[in-house]
Amino acid sequence: MGTENELDVEGQTEPPICGLKSSAACTWSPTPTPTPTPTATATAGTDATDTVGRGSITSTVDTAATAAVFAPESAHIFSVPDVCALFATHGENGLDTPEAARRLQQHGPNKVEGARGLSMWTILMRQVSNSLTLVLVITMVLSFAISDHIEGGVIAAVIVLNIVVGFLQDYRAEQTIQALYALSAPTCKVVRAGQIESIKAEALVPGDLVMLGVGDIVPADLRLVRSINLSTDEALLTGESLPVSKHAEGMLKDMAMPLGDRTNMVYSASTVTRGRATGVAVSTGMMTEVGKIAELLRTAGTPDMQGASAMQRAWLRLANLVRVLLGLVGTPMQVSLSKFALLLFALAIGLAVIVFSVSRWVVTSEVLIYGICVAVAVIPESLIAVLTIATALGTRSMAKGNVVIRKLAALEAVGGVTNICSDKTGTLTQGKMVVKRVWLADGTEVSVQGTTHPFDPTSGSVHVGDEAYTDGLASTDGKKTARLDDLLETVALCNNSTVRTDGVSYTAIGEPTEIALNVLAMRFGIGKPSLLASGGHRLLAEFPFDSSCKRMTVVCTTDTGAAAYTKGAVEALLPLMDTSDEQRTQIVAEAEALAAEGLRVLCIAKRSVDPASFTTLAANTSAEKGAPAAENMPGRADVENHLAFLGLTGLYDPPRLESAAAVDKCQKAGITVHMLTGDHVKTATAIAYEIGILDRARPGPGGNDGIMVASDFDNLSVAQIDAMERLPLVLARCSPTTKVRMVEAMHRRKAFCVMTGDGVNDSPALKISDVGIAMGLNGSDVAKEAADMVLTDDNFASIVTAIEEGRRLFDNIQKFLLHLLVSNIAQVFLLLIGLAFKDPGGVSVFPLSPLEILWANLVTSSFLALGLGIEDAQPDIMQRPPHDLGVGVFTRELIVDKFVYGTAMGALCLAAFTSVAYGGVSGAGGLGRGCNEDFDDVCRVAFRARATTFATLTFLLLVTAWEAKHFTRSLFNMHPERYSGPLSVFRTVWQNKFLLGAVTAGFVVVFPVIYLPVVNRIVFKHDAIGWEWGVVFAAVVVYTAIVEAWKAIKRRFGLGAPILKVRAEEEV
């Protein structure tokens, strides 16, 4: 069999550094192409960052002819001297200080305005812009208009409470987000007037000469002037998961070349992972590529009114304002509640009309008060306050779970998601490289397992062959580890990363791949620091990684002479190694096997060299690192040949420990998890199988288990995407456009999706998704600005926590909605029929006084509803499918239950009133006359009947609060998976101590309200009762029996919420 030099492993054997996509797209000559009229000259100096052989920086560009066509976006197609001339800056000495100050005044500070956050006025308008608040305002105005100051004042207090609570919560959330906004580059080094200065990044101006080193955040868009072994992480901007190799000498020809391919440019917010460089700032602030995306987000959501007439624009603005004020813009629950409030408002008007019609439109003051009383009864005044407080408490709970809510409504919205589109790197995975497998030349395999801290060489376990590695193994079986020592020595010395520890934790600087190799060597005590500390290894030469050759070599002294240590892509090293055809075939097969597991494969090799041919590099030499120190030293081609193969290393970004369990939890909850990543398809596929997104036993959509490359997905038409049975579960090599198309496809399928992202390029998808979630640790400021929620730990498991909390909140909202609406239905039922209870003058007698209604709605019900709002999650909460977003919070079950319970409660309150008023036990005199306003002896029966009705309503509301804890399970057996037995009801009510306290307080407060003099007759229009407590007790027993019977019917016929069945294969 012949030798194979190319591997079909889809680039997995390459080191994790991306270089020039095409050599044909890049040209370089030592001097610029001659053109007339030279304008600037700068002689190469003695700066440590000078590059050997670059020649002098001499501009020959005709600035007058070129300025008209030059733009910062096209700086990559101009030579370095030309760019320096166009910006009137010196290639060595930079700008003068006065000129820099002038440009700062002209161009403004170098900062992105997209992360300025929400104004206090905007946050305030959020609280007012909902239909229920408007309905309460109208009710308050009417109350004051008829001089009912007590009722009007109470409603005004409720409105103020709603606004204050909501404002404080949203404001605190916004402040938390602002605290997460890290300055893209707080300081930077510039050369001004020939002197190196450290300045605030905000003071950077176009034309400044900026110096970059490892770990620096690029402060602006720069055209590189000089670069040495430079690579940058542009994941936040381009989505490319690997560092990109940069070359100042590159001259690109395509003006429209994608950002990721502009290798002579570095962009704001990217990070230097290797090397050093100097560059000219061509764009700052909002003119940078990051700033342009931020500007798009600032204007997003503004309707496109181009071509519209002034009348049409005014109409569109007015229509949008009305929709916002009525709360018809927002999440499904917001819109549902706003529509419900409008419905209640219409119902209140209708009920008032009924009252006026019964009085034949002779609207006296009593009739008007009765009409408003009925209208007030139908409106749950405390709904907004309870909803806001419950959501705020949920937000606080989420913060403990590492999720910051930017928009209060996002918490309830996330509970209804049907699909999650998650990034891979850093969210599903740890975001750091780890060496997982090593294959040595003699066939020995080394595996690293259980790593939880990628920088910690003591984390996890190491197996050499079938044995766990120990110091004893190393000392007693030298032959077994000899080749391993050679490989470890190579990856440690051929390495520019640094791993440090403070005795508690480990930190690292450098490229992810080199850090992983360094940690591997440190696991065996052969790290680079220990090798250099021994004095036996001195650096003689370094040939840095280059994208054209895909390898890196260093030459160091050894105890016996000197050696060249090399690492690189397998296909790049195969022709350079002294191996037989049979061994090469074996190497290729093993590399393909490692790549098929989703590992990035590196080949490790070594050879002996003559130390006399090299000159030792001094630590403080001004020569370029990586360049030979003398012209007669061997070149790269002389050193990188006749290499001895040592082995292969397989690296990957390991999944977070919580990811597999979180994905499984989502699948059991009926939520589909999609992985959208910029990584290679094989790497993405391997991780997807490892964490359970893909299952080999259940093929997914699109063939090959639902895996697609983004380019294939992007080439599909909208009709073709919609014709797919299901959307792909894994999309590899994603671009920002791919993510946006994925979200749009989900919206067309009526799905409610979460999109995660960390980069600036993710912002459009975050913006249009139903719930956008940004990364707090490694995310860009622009992504955080576009998101609804921010993960402070960048962990996928936190998303699942947010969904669970959202479902809990949704359940609890339904619970307290049921409680509040049951009370309203009962009151309306009672008051409408109460129109028939007339005194001798033909005036209807109130079964409940207006203040009794407000007391029940605002005092008794509010605290009970709040107690229901903080209920713990039900045990089966993540075993149910997502709720129907088309239905919203008002499900069929909720609607039926509220009418069943409300009718039963209203009927029993009516029975209590009639039993006292017409039972003849309380004495003669009937309902008296004028008993709606003042107490008189003739009103004793009416006042006692009203007190009995009030007590009955209050106690039934207390019972309803406990019964509403679960819509189908009996109060006497509500948590059988936790506890059972006849006394389980006490543990059930004890579980929610706030609700227990609210019920107890509601029970106790009834007695002073009924028995305190003046308070009872003057304020509440009722009187003290005695034997009537028997009626109240009987009503409570009957009501409890009705509710329990209805729940039993629901359980018998399966009328409750569905539960997803666990897959059979998951139970095996």
Image (cartoon, rainbow, N blue to C red):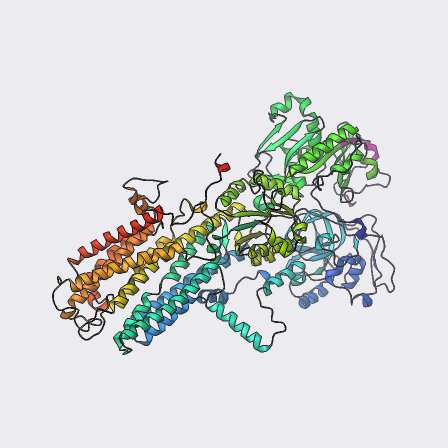
| Number of marks drawn | 0
Q: Which sits in the foreground, 817 or 762?
A: 817
- Which image quarter: residue 588? top right
Q: Which sits in the foreground, 55 or 615?
A: 55
**Residue 30: x percent and y percent?**
85, 52
The majority secondary structure of the magenta stretch comes to loop
Q: Which sits in the foreground, 655 or 352?
A: 352
Q: Which sits in the foreground, 663 or 195?
A: 663
- Which image quarter: residue 224? bottom right
| Relative to 252, residue 612 above or below | above
Image side of residue 138 versus residue 663, left or right: left
**Residue 334: x percent and y percent?**
46, 61
Image side of residue 1000 versus residue 611, left or right: left
**Residue 870: x percent and y percent?**
38, 52
- Which image quarter: residue 600? top right
Asked if the stretch drawn in magenta spans residue 943, the answer is no
Which residue lies most toward the top here? 476
Instruction: Say whether residue 896 is visible.
Output: yes
**Residue 442: x percent and y percent?**
71, 26
> Magenta region: which residues?
606-627
For the N terminus, the image quarter is top right
Image side of residue 847 versus residue 210, left or right: left
Q: Residue at x 36, y 62 (%)?
A: 382
| Relative to 59, residue 1 above or below | above
Image side of residue 678 versus residue 630, left or right: left
Which residue lies most toward the left here? 924
Q: Residue at x 51, y 51 (%)?
A: 418
Instruction: Say whether residue 217 is visible.
Output: no
